[in-house]
Image: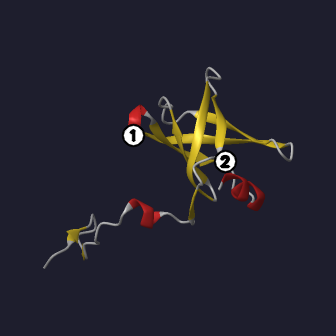
Amino acid sequence: MSGLLTLSGTQRQEQPAVAWAERRTSKRYSSSGQRTLTILERTEFKRHTALVHDLSLRGLGVIVDSPLEVGSIVAILLVNRPTRASGILSGTVCHATPHAEGKWRVGLNLSRNLTDDEILFLI
């Protein structure tokens, strides 16, 4: 019988591998690829210009020129110049992965859910 032995000694069925995207609990939105943000790393307040790749209710995927340290806390500056609206989000870097052309794809877990207006602004 195919299965995995648990600590209690009982067997359970092996579950098929699930792709990362399928394990997400909220819908992901693709960005137009034109929205840029400023990200400040908390320790040194190092400034990064980031291109929004995708987003969810509680996360952002961005493209940056250099990696951010996994686990670091960042401030994300949102500035909508035409409406003169601005805001600051905080988040934690959950991954930094090499991307095309020497860039880095960085995943950010946000400290709160994005509002509907923020989602519309970012996509």
Colour mapping used in the image:
secondary structure
Q: Which mark is residue 109?
A: none
On the image, the x and y values in percent for residue 120 come to 72, 59
Residue 106 image point, x, y percent: 50, 41
Q: Nearer the viewer, mark 2 or mark 1?
A: 1
Closest to the observer: 121 or 116?
Answer: 121
* Viewer-side residue, 32 vs 119: 32
Mark 1 nearby-residue class (10 Å; few <14, some 14–19, many ≥20): few
Q: Secondary structure at mark 2?
A: loop
Q: Earlier in the sequence, mark 2 or mark 1?
A: 1
Residue 26 in the figure: left or right of residue 90: left
| Residue sitting at the far top | 44
Name the residue tied to disc 2.
111
User: Does residue 69 appear in this view?
Assistant: yes
Residue 85 vs residue 111, the one in the foreground? 85
Instruction: Identify whether 100 is placed above or below 110.
Output: above
Amino acid type, residue under disc 2 in the picture: Ser
Q: Is 36 left or right of 98, judged from the image as shown?
A: right
In-front residue for pair 47/9: 47
Instruction: Please state if 9 lies on the left or on the right of 120 as rendered.
Output: left
Q: Is residue 47 above or below residue 84?
A: above
Question: Circle 1 sits on which residue?
Answer: 100
Marks 2 and 1 close (CB-CB < 8 Å):
no
Q: Amino acid at mark 1?
A: Ala
Q: On screen, 12 above or below 92?
A: below
Q: Is residue 5 left or right of residue 42?
A: left
Q: Is residue 114 visible?
A: no
**Residue farthest along the bottom direction in this orientation:** 1
Q: Quadrant of the N terminus?
A: bottom left
